[in-house]
């Protein structure tokens, strides 16, 4: 009878999947094989070559096609009787509103960015639909359950600014300098000097008629007798000019983004480069050759202008081919290779200039070019299975069995999966508990635009904000606005807060609302004159979004794979007693958190949690990982990062 009810719950469920990437492919397959009959998928991305090593529903012939649609077709080949509805669209589009979400029994996230996760979380709260969140980073992963009023929402613990980036952002729509560095290092440098047979998402097909006829099709092919400066200019025009023009042809991509500008070498450096100050030191150590030295550029902390970056790019390319030709084809980026750092810095800056991103110095670029943790297909498969397990519990309304489950890199007491009871809603959360926030800001210097960009959009994750001061509407966006309203709100953006009609000063309470997300927040304004430029670079500080302590529960619960656990957080358990300090890995950064203490236990034994929890929820740390499509920048990552040994 229980088995029949279980089957009916699954077959009668209407499920929404958001994301059809690494986790999404595995999730769709697992849902179909688990006999789910009605599945809807939203994903705005198209398939890229780099997806093929882990997103197994896709093939080489699918490159450039919609992930959601191809995933549907692939699964229907072995489960033709089920209904799968794909949407090749952005989950933040207005058509995916609260009413749309209300039709589903559960929402399953396989997203790769913080902004979209916040958006889906708020829609699920508004629609009162349970959400199962997930993410992976290398061998690490997690699945969490969020049910309104019963468990914490995704935003009950404030997330740090993203430090992980989807591959599609790197290749197509960079918005930060780190995106440009990763592109220059892992795509352009690899294509120029690495294995020529390795798959690469850079477009190599050229329309440059100036190139020799036998190589006109491949912009990266060097004939051997072609002038190196002409070759370098061809590469430059291809990646910074022609490829940008191709990207601009997809008007849908730039509907809500600032368009990049194509940059051609002739526009920056019309004449051929002449002999510059200084000469390359031809020593036995060929890797010491430097474009900076050749061009007379001495200070690595200087920010080069576009012309200087162009010269460094062309000179570094020439030096690689003249001094290190034997290495070409086998090179990989090394931050200790001066010439490699120079060409990556120059290329990143030129791309940044194209996308209107501030330029950076070689010193800064070298620091940004850190390690990258790549996706692991097995982790995605494990996490997808855990999502389905939690989804079934949600559908059966088996509240007591909900678990946040963490996938560990190394076994802890023979466990690779660590289940944890979900926390209750955070009473200090401004999203699900509607707690007011406070903002310290200089109301005489900061403009409304600063408030909108740095707080409303960046910190609060609103997409279509409406800002009110009492009954006065200060700012609004929307397709139904009149021209005079648009002009008025645009003018308000350029006014400092204290000059707005009515003025925003110390003690003002602003109401900020996103109608699509059905999310409203009150912000108390506190005027403050000065800010520490290093510690408070935004010139404003948002606070009040603190974490509430958990309610302690007495009693003993067993800990084991798939078994019941306490609210202890996962870690590597290898010593008698440790402080658990689980790092925040979502978006590659760490947020304030908590340490938990676990006494030594054997498999299947029990832990008295009432004596073990010695610190409050106020300092909680939980693991949050991003989807496998992320390039995760981790500085000095260490397998012992997630634990701290107690002093004896």
Image (cartoon, grey):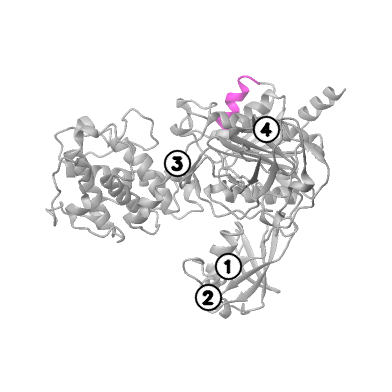
Q: Which residue is mark 3?
A: 372
Q: Are marks 4 and 2 in contact (CB under 8 Å)?
A: no
Residue at (18% x, 45% y) in the render: 229
Mark with earlier residue (1, 3): 3
- The numbered dot on residue 541 is 1
The CA distance from mark 1 to mark 3 is: 31 Å
Residue at (44% x, 45% y) in the render: 170
Residue at (64% x, 67% y) in the render: 467
Mark with earlier residue (2, 3): 3
Instruction: Residue 36 in the image: state x and y as whole percent.
Output: 72, 28
225 is higher (above) or lower (below) than 365: above
The CA distance from mark 1 to mark 2 is: 20 Å
Q: Which residue is mark 2?
A: 495
Secondary structure type for disc 3 = strand
Range shown magenta: 69-79
Does the magenta-highlighted stretch encompass residue 153?
A: no
Mark with earlier residue (4, 2): 4
Secondary structure type for disc 2 = loop
Instruction: Residue 599 in the image: state x and y as whole percent.
Output: 70, 41
Left or right: 339 as drawn, with respect to 179: left
The CA distance from mark 2 to mark 3 is: 42 Å
Secondary structure type for disc 4 = helix
546 is higher (above) or lower (below) than 330: below
Q: Which residue is mark 4?
A: 386
343 is higher (above) or lower (below) than 11: below
The CA distance from mark 4 to mark 3 is: 25 Å
Mark with earlier residue (4, 3): 3
Mark with earlier residue (1, 2): 2
Mark with earlier residue (4, 1): 4
Does the magenta-highlighted stretch encompass residue 70?
A: yes
Q: Looking at the image, which residue sits at the far top?
A: 78
Q: Residues within 10 Å of mark 3 (few under 14, many from 20)?
A: some
């Amino acid at each position: 009878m229980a088995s029949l009810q279980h089957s009916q719950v699954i077959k009668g469920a209407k499920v929404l999947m958001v994301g059809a990437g690494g986790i999404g492919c595995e999730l769709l397959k697992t849902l179909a094989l688990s006999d789910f009959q009605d599945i809807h998928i939203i994903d705005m991305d198209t398939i890229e070559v780099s997806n093929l090593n882990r997103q197994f529903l896709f093939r080489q012939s699918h490159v450039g096609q919609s992930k959601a649609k191809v995933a549907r077709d692939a699964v229907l080949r072995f489960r033709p009787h089920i209904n799968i509805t794909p949407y090749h669209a952005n989950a933040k589009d207005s058509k995916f509103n609260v009413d749309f979400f209300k039709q589903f029994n559960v929402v399953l996230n396989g997203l790769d960015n913080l902004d979209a996760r916040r958006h889906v979380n708020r829609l699920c709260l508004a629609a009162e639909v349970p959400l199962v969140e997930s993410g992976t980073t290398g061998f690490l992963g997690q699945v969490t359950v969020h049910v309104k009023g019963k468990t914490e929402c995704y935003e009950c613990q404030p997330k740090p600014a993203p430090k992980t980036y989807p591959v599609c952002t790197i290749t197509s729509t960079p918005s930060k300098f780190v995106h440009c560095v990763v592109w220059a290092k892992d795509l352009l440098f690899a294509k120029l000097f690495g294995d020529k047979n390795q798959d690469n998402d850079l477009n190599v097909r050229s329309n440059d008629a100036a190139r020799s006829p036998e190589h006109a099709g491949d912009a990266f092919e060097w004939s051997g007798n072609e002038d190196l400066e002409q070759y370098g200019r061809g590469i430059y025009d291809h990646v910074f000019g022609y490829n940008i023009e191709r990207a601009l042809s997809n008007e849908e991509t730039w509907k809500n983004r600032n368009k990049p500008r194509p940059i051609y070498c002739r526009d920056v450096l019309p004449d051929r480069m002449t002999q510059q100050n200084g000469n390359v030191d031809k020593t036995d150590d060929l890797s010491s050759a430097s474009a900076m030295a050749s061009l007379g550029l001495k200070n690595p902390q200087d920010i080069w202008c576009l012309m200087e970056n162009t010269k460094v790019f062309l000179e570094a390319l020439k030096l690689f081919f003249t001094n290190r030709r034997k290495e070409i084809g086998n090179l990989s980026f090394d931050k200790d290779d001066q010439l490699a750092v120079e060409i990556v810095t120059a290329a990143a800056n030129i791309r940044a200039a194209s996308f209107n991103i501030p330029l950076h110095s070689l010193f800064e670029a070298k620091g940004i070019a850190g390690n990258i943790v790549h996706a692991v297909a097995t982790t995605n498969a494990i996490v997808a299975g855990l999502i389905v397990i939690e989804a079934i519990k949600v559908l059966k309304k088996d509240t007591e069995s909900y678990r946040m489950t963490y996938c560990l890199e190394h076994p802890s007491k023979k466990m690779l999966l660590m289940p944890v009871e979900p926390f209750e809603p955070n009473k200090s959360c401004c999203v699900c508990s509607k707690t007011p926030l406070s903002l310290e800001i200089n109301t005489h210097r900061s403009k409304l635009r600063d408030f909108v960009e740095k707080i409303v959009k960046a910190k609060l994750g609103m997409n279509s904000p409406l800002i009110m001061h009492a009954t006065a509407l200060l700012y609004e966006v929307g397709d139904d606005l009149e021209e005079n309203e648009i002009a008025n709100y645009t003018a308000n953006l350029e006014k400092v807060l204290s000059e707005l009609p009515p003025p925003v000063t110390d003690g003002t309470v602003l109401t900020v609302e996103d109608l699509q997300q059905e999310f409203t927040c009150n912000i108390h304004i506190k005027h403050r004159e000065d800010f520490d430029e290093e510690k408070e670079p935004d010139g404003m500080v948002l606070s009040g979004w603190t974490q509430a302590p958990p309610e302690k529960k007495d009693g003993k619960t067993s800990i084991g794979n798939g078994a019941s656990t306490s609210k202890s957080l996962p870690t590597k358990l290898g010593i008698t007693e440790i402080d658990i300090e689980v790092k925040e890995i979502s978006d590659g950064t760490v947020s304030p958190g908590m340490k938990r203490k676990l006494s030594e236990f054997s498999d299947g034994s029990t832990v008295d949690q009432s004596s073990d929890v010695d610190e409050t929820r106020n300092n909680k740390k939980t693991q949050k990982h991003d989807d496998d499509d992320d390039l995760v920048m981790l500085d000095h990552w260490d397998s012992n990062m997630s634990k701290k040994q107690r002093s004896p």
